[in-house]
């Protein structure tokens, strides 16, 4: 089993889109995949039309210890989802006094041996929920938008990862960096991706995710890119990216 967190403390970079479509791509390759929506905004959950009611269990209930992880898992097509809810926004305060609070997610999902991949969509900040994700996984993949400010604030993220490696999870590593919203016609996009490759070298995935209208439209239809338009550039890019991840980058 491989557990991967997709992260960037900046919003709007395509992190949720990447998490769900990499999960869908891996499942198309025959892998058993669980996607965990750890973002209180619950965009991943809502994009798959997995709106949760009070009767349904979410990652919030799992972190609080009210339900077992397996009891909070739903199915979408060929992969499974542990949904989020707006209640998760209060989790940082509610869990502040819990012993080993950074390890709650790790302890909850350690029993899910049946999956080949567990993918976690982190919130756009470096708070307790993101720390839980970093403690629960072996690999972090950073999602960067192909724009001028892409590297802004990245040093803080790398510092947090380093602290987690030292104190909470010695096996954690940055497995790769994904460049999203790329338009090859724009000089700035090409320059930014070149700068990111110069800075991080082989850590940067060969596949870049092109800016593609189908990727923006798919969530409004509550579908992955493969369900919505499997001939689109978005589907081609995410399948290629999933293959890179499967092959160990």
Image: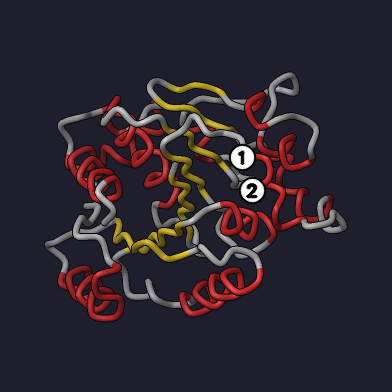
Residue depicted at x 30% and y 33%? 225
The way the protein has been coloured in the rendering is secondary structure
Could you tell me residue 171's position as x and y percent? 51, 63
Mark 2 Cα shell of 10 Å, populated few (<14), some (14-19), many (≥20): some
Disc assigned to residue 88: none
Could you tell me residue 34's position as x and y percent? 48, 34
Disc assigned to residue 106: 2
Residue depicted at x 49% and y 58%? 11
Relative depth, front residue between 104 and 46: 104
Assign a secondary structure to mark 2: helix
Query: Looking at the rendering, which quadrant does residue 69 occupy?
Result: top right
Relative depth, front residue between 136 and 130: 136
Relative depth, front residue between 214 and 246: 246
Residue depicted at x 12% and y 62%? 185
- Give the answer, above or below, for where 214 lies relative to 80: below
Could you tell me residue 117's position as x and y percent? 43, 39
Relative depth, front residue between 172 and 22: 172
Mark 1 Cα shell of 10 Å, populated few (<14), some (14-19), many (≥20): some
Assign a secondary structure to mark 1: helix
On-image quarter of the N terminus: top left
Residue depicted at x 53% and y 32%? 46
On-image quarter of the C terminus: bottom left
**Alpha-carbon span between mark 1 and mark 2:** 6 Å
Q: Are marks 1 and 2 in contact (CB under 8 Å)?
A: yes
Q: Residue furthest right?
A: 97
Residue identified by numbered label 1: 109
């Amino acid at each position: 089993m491989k557990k991967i967190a997709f992260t960037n403390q900046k919003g709007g970079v395509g992190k949720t889109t990447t998490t769900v479509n990499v999960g869908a791509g891996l499942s198309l390759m025959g892998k058993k995949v669980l996607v965990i929506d750890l973002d209180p905004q619950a965009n991943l959950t809502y994009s798959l039309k997995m709106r949760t009611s009070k009767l349904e269990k979410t990652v919030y209930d799992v972190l609080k210890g009210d339900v077992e992880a397996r009891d909070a898992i739903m199915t979408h097509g060929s992969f499974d989802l542990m949904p989020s809810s707006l209640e998760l926004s209060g989790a940082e305060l509610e869990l502040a006094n819990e012993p080993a609070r950074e390890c709650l997610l790790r302890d909850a999902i350690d029993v899910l041996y049946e999956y080949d991949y567990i993918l976690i969509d982190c919130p756009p900040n470096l708070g307790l929920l993101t720390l839980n994700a970093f403690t629960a996984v072996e690999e972090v993949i950073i999602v960067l938008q192909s724009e001028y400010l892409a590297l802004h604030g990245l040093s803080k993220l790398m510092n947090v990862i380093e602290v987690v490696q030292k104190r909470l999870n010695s096996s954690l590593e940055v497995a790769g960096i994904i460049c999203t919203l790329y338009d090859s016609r724009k000089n700035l996009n090409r320059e930014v991706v070149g700068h990111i490759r110069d800075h991080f070298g082989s850590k940067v995935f060969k596949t870049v995710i092109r800016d593609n209208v189908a990727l923006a439209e798919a969530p409004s239809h509550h579908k992955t890119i493969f369900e919505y338009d499997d001939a689109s550039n978005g589907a081609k890019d995410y399948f290629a990216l999933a293959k890179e991840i499967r092959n160990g980058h």
